[in-house]
Image (tube, helix red, strand yellow):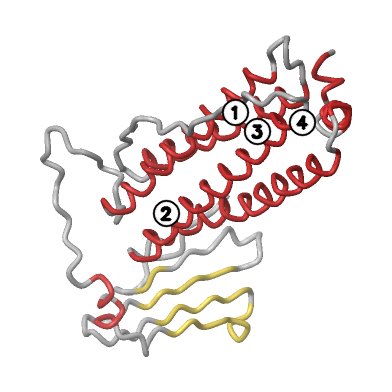
Amino acid sequence: MAAFASVAPVGVSTFAPDASLSTRRVSVVAAPTSSRSAARMTFSSGNPSGGQTIDFSDVDVTDAGAQFSGMVFTPDTADAPLSRANVGFSQACQDAVNNQIQVEYTASYAYHAMFAYFNRDTVALPGFAKYFEEQSLEERTHADEFMRYMNKRGGQVVLKPLAVPSMSFNNTDGTSDAVYAMDLHLQLEKFVWAKLEEVAAAANADNDLSLADLIDDYLQEQVAAVKKAADMVAQLKRVGTPHGVWHFDQEVLGGEDAQA
């Protein structure tokens, strides 16, 4: 059971538990109405000398509210606003993100075409087919992530036509088509890197910390992607024979598992 103490003087609030329990009293002295507060809160437990005091007498209430100067609440009266979530997401940054969505979809489309080529019965390199199918899905996933981010920030997604690079696999001597595809892969990854840097530049120009932080993660991932593609181009140039390409397909790209 808890019992309230007798009525306290004006400006002082007290509460005491039942007498059978140890006494714990909280006193709050109201501040004067001047801008310089003299509020004092005393907490005591059982013995008056054991209290702790939090003194706000030196707090300048006027200065404390200065950071909110000029902040005005305006009711939302728009019938169909472009966004209610947009907080400082500039049009320049939105344009950069939309361009990146186009780049990611373009890379995905190109990789899907490469998957289709290596999956043909006359080519029959299942490891290459599996690898480029995974690359296509990864780039498409990136495009989806950028679209979701755009909506989260209150921007507008604008999908653009795809600019698919010209691809030719005419020289199918058992090595050149594989090297050609992997070299094209390397150039696409470098292209994605360059476009990510453009988004980063737009974010830095507008001091958009959220977008800059997001793009930094993609740039670090892209560093690894470029290095991996460059390594595979070098390795394919070393194997140099149709059997070497087949072995690369089976062992490095997991063609045996893909075929199963």
Near mark 3 (Cα within 10 A), the count class, few <14, some 14-19 or many ≥20, is: many
Q: CA distance from mark 4 to mark 1?
A: 25 Å
| Residue 237 image offset from top left, x and y in percent | 79, 42
| Residue 57 image offset from top left, x and y in percent | 37, 88
Q: CA distance from mark 3 to mark 2?
A: 27 Å
Label disc, if present, on residue 137 of the rendered structure: 1
> Residue at point 65% right, 33% down?
181
- Among the 4 quarters of the image, the one containing residue 78: top left
Badge nearest the viewer, 4 or 2? 4
| Residue 174 image offset from top left, x and y in percent | 78, 25
User: What residue sits right under mark 4 in the picture?
Assistant: 175
Label disc, if present, on residue 181 of the rendered structure: 3
In the rendered view, tell whether residue 12 sits above or below residue 121.
Answer: below
> Is residue 61 or residue 89 the one in the foreground?
89
User: What residue sits right under mark 2 in the picture?
Assistant: 199
> Residue at point 58% right, 24% down?
112
> Residue at point 71% right, 36% down?
179
In the rendered view, tell whether residue 41 sits above or below residue 235.
Answer: below
Query: Residue 241 vs residue 17: left or right?
Result: right
Q: CA distance from mark 3 to mark 1?
A: 17 Å
Total tally of numbered discs in the picture:
4
Badge nearest the viewer, 3 or 2? 3
Nearer-N-terminus badge (3/2): 3
| Residue 89 image offset from top left, x and y in percent | 31, 52
| Residue 144 in view | no
Q: CA distance from mark 1 to mark 2?
A: 22 Å
Label 3 amino acid?
A: Ala
Q: CA distance from mark 4 to mark 3?
A: 10 Å
Q: CA distance from mark 4 to mark 2?
A: 37 Å
| Residue 61 in view | yes
